[in-house]
Image: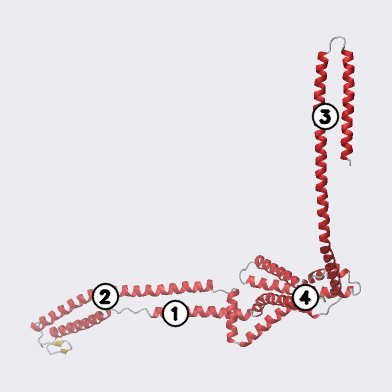
């Protein structure tokens, strides 16, 4: 485990092996630094897993995403810590600028890690706020639907006035019927709201007049019944149209409510917006948010801070010594490069010269062999001609002379080869 932490701290094992005086102390220091590097990576993995869980409900996705983000944070923090070191041979300006750049980058990474954790810290409050927003949106839509339904005008009843007229005609008909009964059965005068009897028991002119009035009222009632029937149909059509309008408003409201329930988001951005609303409602929320972000940022920059805060140890001094040796060795190598290049150039020139000489010698040898071959061809041709022209009986003498010529020719060729080899070996 200590080796893992030392690796996370970015310490060079070769330098640690050269720390002979405080070996255990230096290893403990770098192992502790590696543990500090691991903490932000773990927090980053949890933070990203939570952030992705707000976007998807598939554990495989958000757990994998959290693991990858944790590895990314671990790699970045390890690089920041491993590439920063104290030294007595570096210029202060270069060291300061390097520290500031790494510190700024560490703060950015810390903020990215901290923000999802802040949302997790306020999870219950944000959930409650989002639920209230959802309920408010639903209530507002319901109220708007009720207002729209109430705004639909009520159709004026066309049958009501006609029905009142019919009631009046029916009342007059009843009154006239009663008056006719008194006219036919009583010898005394009877006064009612629709007229006066004649006082004669028989059905005379007054009785006939009342009968005519009754028939007229019945005709009026019949006409009113037709009008009432038509008016009631018109009222039913108007009522149906109004109800259809109200039903359409209600249907649209139900669709909007279903859309609100389906699309009302509680993802990462919605929780960020809810957190902003909480900050506006209560300044303490802003303070706690900034405190939590600052805390997690401090945890992320802690490895860098602790490495800067600890004094130089044997590791840094051994590293400076090795760096100085490496610089001197590189300078010596750079100084020797011109001499090496000159020697290589001379060797190349010599090799070119030797190659040219060898090519020339090879050409001479080839030319000599070619000349010797042509000379032999000529000699053999002459020998053939001599043999053809030799008279019979002189063949042995001729062969003896040919043999002598061959010996002389071979001696001449051997002499030429010897002189050529002597020239080539000088």
Q: Looking at the rendered structure, which numbered label has been put on residue 36?
A: 4
Q: Residues within 10 Å of mark 4 (few under 14, many from 20)?
A: many
At which x and y percent is residue 176? 17, 83
Of circles 3 and 4, the one toward us is: 3
Answer with left or right where residue 412 lies relative to residue 59. right
Label 3 or label 1, whichever comes before in sequence order? 1
Q: Looking at the rendered structure, which numbered label has been put on residue 231?
A: 2
Q: Residues within 10 Å of mark 1 (few under 14, many from 20)?
A: some
> Which residue is found at the position 67% from the left and 71% from the top?
48
Q: Quadrant of the N terminus?
A: bottom right
Q: Quadrant of residue 416?
A: top right
Answer with left or right where residue 109 lies relative to residue 22. left
Tag 1 residue: 144
Tag 3 residue: 372
Q: Quadrant of the C terminus?
A: top right
Label 4 or label 2, whichever comes before in sequence order? 4
Q: Nearer the viewer, residue 137 or 72?
A: 72
Of circles 3 and 1, the one toward us is: 3
Q: Nearer the viewer, residue 17 or 269?
A: 17
């Amino acid at each position: 485990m200590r080796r893992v932490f030392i690796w996370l701290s970015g310490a060079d094992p070769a330098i640690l092996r050269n720390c002979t005086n405080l070996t255990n102390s230096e290893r403990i220091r770098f192992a502790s630094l590696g543990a500090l590097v691991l903490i932000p990576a773990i927090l980053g993995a949890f933070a990203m897993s939570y952030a992705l869980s707000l976007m998807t409900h598939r554990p495989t996705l958000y757990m994998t995403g959290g693991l990858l983000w944790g590895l990314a944070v671990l790699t970045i923090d390890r690089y920041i810590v491993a590439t920063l070191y104290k030294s007595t041979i570096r210029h202060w300006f270069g060291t300061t600028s390097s520290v500031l750049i790494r510190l700024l980058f560490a703060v950015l990474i810390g903020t990215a890690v901290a923000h999802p954790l802040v949302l997790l810290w306020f999870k219950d409050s944000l959930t409650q706020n989002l639920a209230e927003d959802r309920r408010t949106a639903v209530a507002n839509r319901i109220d708007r639907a009720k207002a729209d339904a109430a705004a639909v005008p009520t159709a004026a009843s066309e049958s009501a006035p006609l029905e009142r007229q019919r009631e009046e005609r029916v009342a007059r008909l009843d009154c006239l019927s009663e008056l006719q009964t008194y006219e036919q059965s009583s010898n005394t005068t009877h006064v009612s709201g629709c007229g006066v009897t004649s006082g004669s028991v028989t059905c005379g002119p007054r009785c006939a007049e009342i009968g005519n009035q009754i028939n007229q009222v019945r005709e009026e009632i019949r006409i009113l019944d037709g009008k009432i029937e038509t008016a009631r149909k018109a009222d039913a059509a108007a009522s149906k149209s109004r109800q259809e309008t109200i039903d359409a408003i209600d249907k649209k409201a139900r669709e909007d409510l279903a859309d609100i329930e389906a699309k009302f988001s509680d993802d990462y951005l919605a929780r960020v917006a809810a957190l902003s609303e909480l900050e506006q409602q209560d300044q303490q929320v802003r303070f706690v948010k900034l405190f939590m972000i600052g805390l997690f940022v401090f945890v992320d920059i802690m490895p860098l801070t602790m490495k800067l805060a600890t004094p130089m140890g044997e590791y840094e001094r051994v590293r400076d010594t090795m760096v100085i040796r490496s610089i001197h060795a590189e300078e010596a190598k750079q100084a020797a490069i011109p001499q090496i290049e000159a020697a290589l150039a001379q060797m190349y020139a010599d090799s070119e010269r030797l190659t040219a000489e060898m090519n020339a010698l090879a050409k001479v040898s080839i030319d000599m062999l070619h000349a010797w071959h042509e000379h032999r061809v000529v000699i053999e041709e002459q020998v053939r001609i001599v043999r053809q022209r030799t008279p019979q009986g002189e063949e042995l003498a001729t062969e003896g002379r040919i043999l002598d010529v061959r010996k002389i020719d071979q001696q001449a060729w051997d002499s030429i080869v010897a002189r050529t080899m002597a020239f080539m070996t000088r």
